[in-house]
Image (spheres, rainbow, N blue to C red):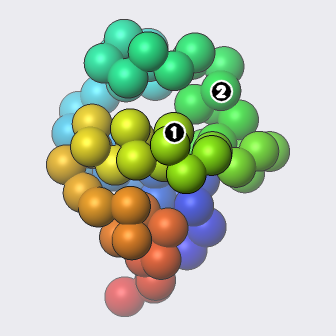
Amino acid sequence: MSLGTTIRRLRKARNLTQHALSAITHIPQGKISQYETDKTVPSLRTASTLAQALHTTVDALLWEEDT
């Protein structure tokens, strides 16, 4: 599973829109969209912010595999 797919799946599991996740994390909505479509990869600091907002760990966010 790609990082973008994982971010999108976790965001939707929390019933968050990209706009809501942006408001929580202070990451621009456009960047969240780019992450979810695998057009760019977040920095480690940004991945940590996303993981915290999505109630997971950076390891789980970066290394989630298909189950």
- Residue type (three-letter) at the residue carrying disc 2: Lys
Q: Residue at x 39, y 71 (%)?
A: 59
Residue at the limit of the structure toward the bottom, as seen here: 67
Q: Position of residue 11 (x, y in %)?
A: 34, 41
Q: Which residue is mark 1?
A: 46
Q: Residues within 10 Å of mark 1 (few under 14, many from 20)?
A: some
> Taking the image as drawn, is residue 17 in sight?
no
Q: Which mark lies nearer to you, 1 or 2?
A: 1
**19 vs 42, nearest the viewer:** 42
Alpha carbon distance from label 1 to label 2: 10 Å
- Label count reads 2
Q: Position of residue 60 (x, y in %)?
A: 35, 70
Q: Residues within 10 Å of mark 2 (few under 14, many from 20)?
A: some
Q: In the image, is 10 to the left or to the right of 19?
A: left
In the picture, residue 67 is in which quadrant? bottom left
| Dots 1, 2 in contact, CB < 8 A | yes
Vertical placement of residue 62 versus 38, above or below: below
> Taking the image as drawn, is residue 33 in sight?
yes
Q: In the image, is 5 to the left or to the right of 52?
A: right
- Residue type (three-letter) at the residue carrying disc 1: Thr
Residue at the limit of the structure toward the right, as seen here: 39
Task: Determine the secondary structure under disc 2.
Answer: helix
Q: In the image, is 55 to the left or to the right of 31?
A: left
Q: Residue at x 57, y 31 (%)?
A: 32
Task: Determine the secondary structure under disc 1.
Answer: helix
- Image quarter of the N terminus: bottom right
Vertical placement of residue 29 versus 3, above or below: above
Q: Which residue is mark 2?
A: 31
**43 vs 15, nearest the viewer:** 43
Q: Residue at x 40, y 41 (%)?
A: 50
Vertical placement of residue 27 versus 32, above or below: above
